[in-house]
Image (cartoon, rainbow, N blue to C red):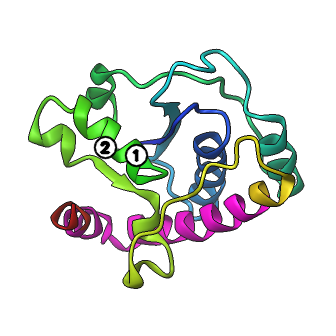
């Protein structure tokens, strides 16, 4: 399975979600999952993740090897699941979708969070905010990624994606 995490600029939230997902997938022993990240905007193409995102991630034991890239419609063909950070990212990708199959791959990360039963929360963009925003972002991402990994492990990811699609 190929999973892509997506945010706006691909320097804060999506590389953080990628790093968290890579480690949790590895810890769960899910060997057949490939993880990448992109952004919907072209603001930071080629850049490393934001220094605050790296710093907080490294404090938590994550590593970062990717550079920012922009999502293009042909990428729908390269992935099985596209996990976006907020409703704006979701709308941007749905606008790029060429087929219902492309649309069916898009879901907000918050749909897998432990509190998703009360509604799907966006992962707020910490760009330009103090360190505490990055701490909060990682807390939220780690919780939701744990739910995603559990859904991949127990085979319910498809059901969650389908249910999210109905709520759009």
Instruction: State which region is magenta.
Output: 135-163
Q: Is residue 17 left or right of residue 156?
A: right
Q: Is residue 146 left or right of residue 105?
A: right
Question: Which residue corresponds to mark 1?
Answer: 88
Q: Dot 2 surroundings within 10 Å: few (below 14), some, or many (20 or more)?
A: some
Q: Position of residue 123 (x, y in %)?
A: 55, 58
For the C terminus, the image quarter is bottom left
Q: Position of residue 107 (x, y in %)?
A: 34, 54
> Any magenta on residue 139?
yes
Q: Is residue 11 above or below residue 63?
A: above
In front here: 36 or 85?
A: 85
Quarter where residue 59 is shown: bottom right
The reply to whether residue 82 is in sight is: no
Marks 2 and 1, Cα distance to the nearest angstrom? Answer: 5 Å
Question: Which residue corresponds to mark 2?
Answer: 91
In front here: 41 or 34?
A: 41
| Main SS of residues in magenta | helix
């Amino acid at each position: 399975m190929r999973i892509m995490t997506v945010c706006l600029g691909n320097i804060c939230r999506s590389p953080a979600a990628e790093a968290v997902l890579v480690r949790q997938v590895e810890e769960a022993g899910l060997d057949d999952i490939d993880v990448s990240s992109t952004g919907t905007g072209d603001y930071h193409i080629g850049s490393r993740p934001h220094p605050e995102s790296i710093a907080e991630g490294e404090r938590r034991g994550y590593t970062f090897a990717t550079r920012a890239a922009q999502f293009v419609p042909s990428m729908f063909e390269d992935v099985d699941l596209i996990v976006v950070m907020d409703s704006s990212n979701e709308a941007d990708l749905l606008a790029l979708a060429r087929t219902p199959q492309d649309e069916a791959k898009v879901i907000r990360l918050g749909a897998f969070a432990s509190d998703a039963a009360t509604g799907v929360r966006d992962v707020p963009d910490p760009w330009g905010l103090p360190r505490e925003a990055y701490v909060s972002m990682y807390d939220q991402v780690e919780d939701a990624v744990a739910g995603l990994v559990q859904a991949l492990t127990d085979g319910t990811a498809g059901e969650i994606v389908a249910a999210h699609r109905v709520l759009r």
